[in-house]
Image (cartoon, grey):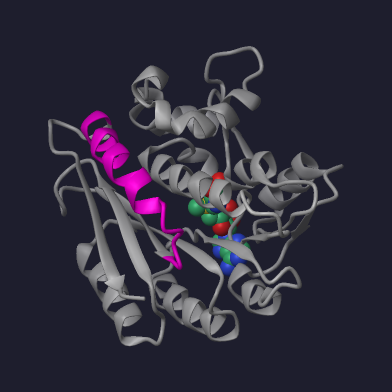
Amino acid sequence: MLSYRHSFHAGNFGDVIKHVVLTELLRYATLKGKAITYIDTHAGAGCFDLRSEHASKLNEWEQGVGRLKRGEFPELETYFSVIDEVNPDGGLDFYPGSPIFAQALLRGRDSGKLFELHSRDCETLTETMAGDLRFEVRRFDGFKGLIKQVPPPSSRAVVLIDPPYEVKEDYDTVVQTLADAYRKFPTGTYALWYPVVERSRIDQMVAEIRKSEIRDVRRWELGVKPDGTGGMTAAGMIVLNPPWTLQDKLDPVMTRLAAVLGNDHAGFAACDVIAEE
Ligand SMILES: C[S@@+](CC[C@H](N)C(=O)[O-])C[C@H]1O[C@@H](n2cnc3c(N)ncnc32)[C@H](O)[C@@H]1O
């Protein structure tokens, strides 16, 4: 039974770090000539109406993307330009999901495989991506789908793994899936999003990655309040085979994002190496 709906959370601070990092990964991957495959294991509905009943219930976006002033983040021009594309009348009525960021950044020769298990969200995503022949949407388990897709024919890929973590097994499944995918396709760029609700679960996940054969892993995390103070206090992206430019690009901007998105001056940004090259 799938109860998680991303429409309640779209545009929150967890989405901001996820999509800022994803934008950078896709921007870098599409600088070079050869085709890439984008694989989104948990793609969601595609685009989110911030005025909908779901989004207005918690208005999480107001503490996330709603706090960002474009002029303060000139380095995030690409991220904001994708948000503009879904808000042609200006303002911020809609927030793009990961498939829309990919759609905006992929070139004609690139392709995307999008997995989404929730029937309604998969239907919405299929409608949203209809007509864009670069993308294939499948109602299928994204963990299993990823293993089937790697290595891709293009031999270059950016993979986003973004499960809801509603079932605790997800914390184990993500590491197992990463290790299995890495074994089949060690040169892909993989990004794993995680929420910090209980810090011990993330520490455990990171320890398991360290114990695995996976190499060249970095992590970026954005916190809005101290650990253990209720709900999701931080969110992060663990990136395998990050482009060499990523750290220089992200580190300064993450610190400023943390200052804007943090509550009561408790925001923090962290970057560390989980496994060396
Ligand atoms: C955090 S949301 C994804 C948000 C999306 N990546 C974005 O950035 O816009 C997680 C999604 O995974 C879907 N889901 C849950 N389990 C899944 C599975 N095993 N395979 C594929 N999708 C799944 C949920 O229905 C939900 O839409």
Give the residues in magenta.
240-260
Give x and y (percent) for residue 141: 64, 70
Q: Work out whether residue 102 can be spotted.
A: yes
Magenta portion: prevailing SS class:
helix
Question: Can you tell which quarter of the image residue 145 is in?
Answer: bottom right
Task: From the top left corner, tell me how far across and down residue 86 is, in percent.
Answer: 64, 27
- Indicate left or right for 129 with 63 as reference: right
Q: Quadrant of ligand 1?
A: bottom right
Side of 82 where 109 appears, left or right = right
Closer to the camera in the image, 41 or 216: 216
Is residue 264 found inside the magenta-colored segment of the image? no
**Relative height, residue 216 to residue 23 (above, below):** below
Figure quadrant of residue 29: bottom right
Determine the residue positioned at 33% across, 48% down: 248
In the image, farthest residue toward the front:
33
Q: Residue at x 47, y 27 (%)?
A: 56
Residue at horizontal 24 percent and vertical 48 percent from the top: 233
Q: Position of residue 266 (x, y in %)?
A: 13, 38
Residue occupying the point 63% across, 78% down: 147
Q: Nearer the viewer, residue 125 or 242?
A: 242
Res. 119 image quadrant: bottom right
**Is residue 116 depicted above or below 77 in this figure?**
below
Given residues 277 and 167, the one toward you in this image is: 277
